[in-house]
């Protein structure tokens, strides 16, 4: 499948981070302390101050984001944010939780849910997350070398104006810096299963 690199400057920030600077071909992003994305469920709070660098995601297209999963503090996270508005979005990638990198997704339609699974051997490695939009669904896959792993098949409202790109948050502390190593778009996956 043919992907086209997206220049970092093509995206628009949902919320500007503390800093974002190009380092060679990479983008280094320092999220704000206490930044997060969440709507109500279980915790009772609303956070809409995570940092997403978004471009349009038309039906039939995909976006891939690569980054170093070099996290050590509770809930440090990075990956792809797919967003229509403050109550309709999906974030997917790696989140450091309970002592290990967790690969998962949060799907938000007015309220958030969270699916996650531990991938301790992905710590410190380059991870690539891929989201394909087709009709009323997003297919989320991830890999750290090797084969793609299916992370989530998530429903979306196809009538909403979806955008997508790299995101990061630092809910519990300041001082995190995330190294993004790739951002590309291309055609959506042709099928859910090989």
Image: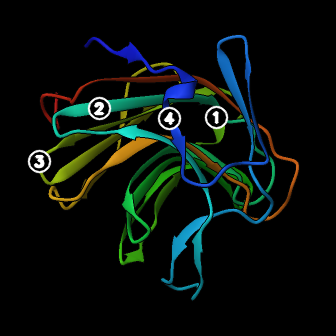
For marks 4 and 1 on the same chain, the one whose residue lies earlier in the sequence: 4
Q: Which residue is mark 3?
A: 135
- Residue 67 or residue 10, whichever sits in front: 10
Whether residue 101 can be seen here:
no
For marks 4 and 3 on the same chain, the one whose residue lies earlier in the sequence: 4
Q: Disc 4 and disc 2: Cα gap in Å?
A: 15 Å
Q: Disc 4 or disc 2, which is closer to the eye?
A: 4
Q: Residue at x 36, y 45 (%)?
A: 163
For marks 2 and 3 on the same chain, the one whose residue lies earlier in the sequence: 2
Q: Which residue is mark 1?
A: 121
Q: Residues within 10 Å of mark 3 (few under 14, many from 20)?
A: some
Q: Residue 122 location, x and y as percent?
A: 62, 34
Count how many numbered circles sit on residues in the image. Answer: 4
Regarding mark 4 in the picture, which secondary structure is present there? Answer: loop
Regarding mark 2 in the picture, which secondary structure is present there? Answer: strand
Regarding mark 1 in the picture, which secondary structure is present there? Answer: helix
Q: Disc 1 or disc 2, which is closer to the eye?
A: 2
């Amino acid at each position: 499948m043919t992907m086209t690199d997206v220049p970092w400057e093509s995206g628009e920030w949902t919320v500007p981070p503390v800093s974002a600077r190009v380092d060679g071909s990479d983008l280094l992003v320092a999220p704000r302390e206490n930044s997060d994305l969440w709507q109500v469920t279980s915790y009772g709070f609303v956070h809409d101050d995570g940092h997403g660098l978004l471009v349009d995601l038309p039906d039939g297209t995909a976006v891939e984001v690569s980054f170093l999963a070099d996290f050590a503090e509770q809930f440090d996270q990075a990956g792809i944010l797919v967003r229509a508005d403050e109550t309709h979005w999906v974030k997917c990638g790696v989140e450091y939780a309970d002592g290990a990198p967790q690969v998962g997704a949060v799907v938000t339609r007015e309220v958030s849910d969270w699916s996650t699974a531990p991938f301790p051997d992905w710590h410190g490695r380059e991870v690539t997350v891929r989201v394909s939009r087709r009709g009323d669904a997003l297919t989320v896959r991830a890999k750290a070398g090797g084969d793609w792993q299916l992370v989530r098949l998530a429903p979306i409202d196809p009538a909403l104006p979806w955008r997508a790109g790299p995101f990061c948050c630092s809910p519990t502390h300041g001082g995190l810096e995330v190294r993004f190593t790739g951002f590309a778009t291309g055609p959506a996956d042709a099928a859910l299963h090989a």
